[in-house]
Image: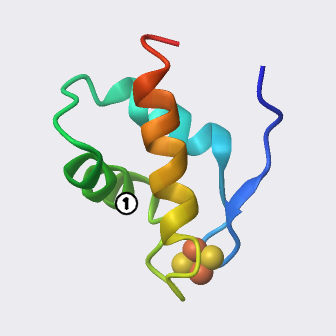
């Protein structure tokens, strides 16, 4: 169980927001296209961009963790 925390400070997007958006995103293509989708849904990484890698890491982590 991962503790919820803010991943994107600019847009106040939390780990749970990303996880939830991922679960609503049924078609997993690749990390980058999924990232774009998550970005549209949550607005994460649309400010300074400093969280870009963090968001990518979380997406790949959740994607590789099967149907968590
Ligand atoms: S921390 Fe996410 S865009 Fe700045």
Residue 3 as seen in the image, left or right of residue 39:
right
Figure check: 19 above or below 9: above
Figure check: 62 above or below 38: above
Q: Which residue is drawn at 58% across and 81% down?
A: 50
Considering the numbered disc 1 on the image, is that residue within a helix, a strand or a loop?
helix
* Residue 11 in the image, given as x and y percentages of width and height: 60, 71
Q: Foreground residue, 24 or 55?
A: 55
Q: Would you say the beta carbon of the disc 1 residue lies within 8 angstroms of ligand 1?
A: no
Which residue of the protein is positioned furthest toward the bottom in this rendering? 48
Q: Which residue is drawn at 50% across and 30% down?
A: 62
Look at the image and tell me in which quarter the N terminus lies.
top right
Residue 8 as seen in the image, left or right of residue 49:
right
- The residue where tag 1 is placed is 39
* Residue 13 in the image, given as x and y percentages of width and height: 62, 58
Rendering quarter of residue 9: bottom right
* Residue 46 in the image, given as x and y percentages of width and height: 44, 78
* Residue 49 in the image, given as x and y percentages of width and height: 49, 82
Residue 65 as seen in the image, left or right of residue 51:
left
Q: Residue at x 75, y 57 (%)?
A: 6
């Amino acid at each position: 169980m991962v503790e919820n925390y803010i991943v994107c400070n600019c847009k106040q997007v939390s780990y749970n927001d990303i996880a939830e958006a991922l679960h609503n995103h049924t078609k997993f293509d690749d990390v980058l296209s999924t990232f774009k989708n998550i970005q549209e849904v949550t607005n994460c990484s649309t400010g300074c961009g400093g969280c870009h890698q963090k968001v990518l890491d979380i997406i790949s982590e959740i994607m590789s963790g099967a149907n968590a």
